[in-house]
Image (cartoon, helix red, strand yellow):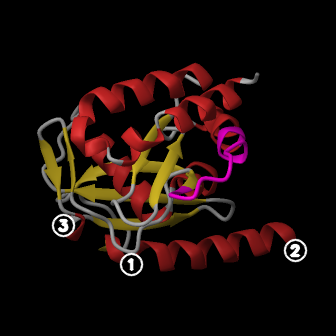
């Protein structure tokens, strides 16, 4: 039995507990993390809100070399009536407030600048309160990018990603984070159009 099949066998055996994980969240999440790491040590997960179906997101944690493991595990998923299995953190209609290790950022307070080097898009993310060496706020920045653009696009269609304080001085034009998906898609379409059809 493959690692993927072993994982899904375990998932089915524990499906009721996973669906109602709020009853004993820490224990269930620890078990799930352990099982996922048997497939690939970089795999992480998210759950959607409880309804008639519940979303189970398999993520590479932003680590590109784990992308094939995410795809393989999601592809191997058996039909599950109460679950929607999603490979990679998807775009969300609107980014949520992100809290991580005692730090909290509201996406409404975040700005961005898109960069265009003619080959691949880049982004500056301006985060309130960011100082040099603040690993927690930088991690929040990456989580916000994943929510705004989706994990797959962040890792495959963005080159330079730079986290900057809100008061950083740059010559680039800034926009609210909520504008990023539309502006990013437009830039990527233009860049990939040029790549496919060199003039």
- Sequence-first tag of 1 and 3: 3
Please check the rendered image and state whether residue 61 is part of the magenta-colored stretch, yes or no. Answer: no
The N terminus: image quadrant: top right
Task: Give x and y (percent) for residue 172.
Answer: 38, 68
- What mark, if any, has residue 109 been given in the picture? 3
- Sequence-first tag of 2 and 1: 1
Judging depth in this view, the residue of 22 and 110 nearest the camera is 22
Query: CA separation, marks 2 and 1?
Result: 27 Å
Task: Give x and y (percent) for residue 80.
Answer: 60, 53
Judging depth in this view, the residue of 53 and 155 nearest the camera is 53
Residue 103 makes an appearance in the image: yes
The C terminus: image quadrant: bottom right
Q: Is residue 107 left or right of residue 113?
A: left
Residue under numbered circle 2: 197
Quarter of the image for residue 186 reads bottom right
Residue segment shown in magenta: 72-84
| Residue located at (28% from left, 51% from top) | 164
* Disc nearest the viewer among 2 and 3: 3
Quarter of the image for residue 5 reads top right
Badge 3 marks a residue whose secondary structure is: helix
Task: Give x and y (percent) for residue 48.
Answer: 38, 57
Query: CA separation, marks 1 and 3?
Result: 13 Å
| Residue located at (12% from left, 50% from top) | 129
* Disc nearest the viewer among 2 and 1: 1
Residue under numbered circle 1: 179
Up/down of 15 relative to 179, above or below: above
């Amino acid at each position: 039995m493959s690692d993927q099949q072993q994982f899904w066998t375990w998932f089915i055996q524990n499906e009721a507990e996973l669906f109602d994980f709020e009853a004993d969240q820490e224990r269930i999440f620890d078990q799930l993390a352990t099982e996922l790491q048997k497939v690939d040590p970089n795999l992480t997960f998210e759950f959607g809100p409880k309804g008639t179906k519940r979303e189970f997101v398999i993520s590479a944690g932003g680590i590109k070399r784990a992308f094939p493991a995410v795809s393989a595990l999601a592809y191997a998923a058996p039909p599950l009536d109460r679950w929607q299995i999603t490979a990679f953190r998807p775009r969300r209609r609107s980014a949520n407030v992100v809290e991580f290790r005692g730090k909290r950022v509201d996406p409404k307070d975040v700005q961005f600048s898109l960069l265009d080097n003619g080959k691949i898009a880049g982004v500056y993310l301006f985060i309130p309160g960011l100082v040099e060496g603040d690993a927690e706020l930088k991690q929040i920045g990456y989580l916000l990018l994943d929510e705004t653009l989706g994990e797959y696009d962040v890792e495959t269609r963005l080159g330079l990603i730079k986290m900057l304080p809100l008061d950083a001085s740059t010559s680039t034009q800034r926009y609210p984070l909520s504008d990023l998906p539309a502006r990013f898609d437009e830039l990527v379409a233009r860049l990939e159009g040029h790549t496919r059809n060199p003039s």
